[in-house]
Image (tube, rainbow, N blue to C red):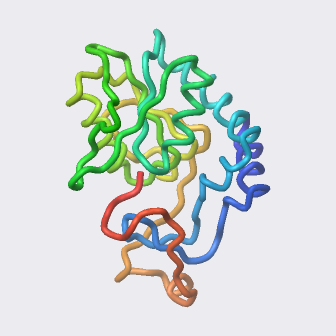
Amino acid sequence: MGRQEVLTHFRQAGALLEGHFILSSGLHSPVYLQCARVLMDPRRAAELCRALALKVTAEFRGAIDLVISPAMGGVVVGYEMARQLGTESIFAERLDGQFALRRGFEISPEARVLMVEDVVTTGLSSRECIACIRDCGGLVVGAASLVDRSGGKANLGVRLVSLLTIEAPTYPADDLPAELAAIPAVKPGSRYLGQDKG
């Protein structure tokens, strides 16, 4: 699946937004990708994740035993990626500010784990989820996301495979370009300010 086809899916789902957005990291951006909207349609989710699973299979040789995603944004894409890869899916949740496995989820010793996100921006929550996987005994083979909005600059400490890579500018609140500052800011994300997304 090519870049334009992926962007078309996002546009058709009303998931590619332009304006002035406050990201979960607290940074501001003129572009926002709302993966929850693009994943609303199970057929579209399956098509996008099938394309991402093909890239993952080509990049990471060997079996993947488990897919783990950070809650909340990664849960749906992680589940569908696991379905496409023929493996199980679980998710990590924040407990006292740290990712942890709950709900009876466990990682078998030495299990080969793929960490899956919806969107990677700075990579902070991805790195935290990867640390949780390692702390629980998993071997992280790599990471995957529908969108890498860092333009390939986010460092997760493992290889990241994304269906769409874009470089969407971000700015601290006290250093906005005039054209962005002139637009009222909205915060469409799922988490409160102060916790980084992606």
Residue occupying the point 73% across, 46% down = 41
In which image quadrant can residue 174 be found? Answer: bottom left
Q: How many marks?
A: 0
Along the viewing direction, whichever of 152 and 34 lies nearer the viewer: 34
Residue occupying the point 47% across, 36% down = 116
Residue occupying the point 23% across, 49% down = 98
In this rendering, position of residue 151 left or right of residue 94: right
Q: Furthest-bottom residue in view?
A: 182
Residue 178 at what x, y percent from top left? 51, 87
Residue 86 at what x, y percent from top left? 57, 17
Along the viewing direction, whichever of 121 and 78 lies nearer the viewer: 78
Above or below, comparing residue 109 to residue 97 in the picture: above
Above or below, comparing residue 176 to residue 42 in the picture: below
Residue 8 at what x, y percent from top left? 77, 50
Residue occupying the point 41% across, 51% down = 198
Q: Furthest-front residue in view?
A: 104
Q: Furthest-top residue in view?
A: 62
In which image quadrant can residue 96 be found? Answer: bottom left
Residue 88 at what x, y percent from top left? 49, 22
Q: Quadrant of the N terminus?
A: top right
Along the viewing direction, whichever of 179 and 133 lies nearer the viewer: 133
Above or below, comparing residue 36 to residue 181 in the picture: above
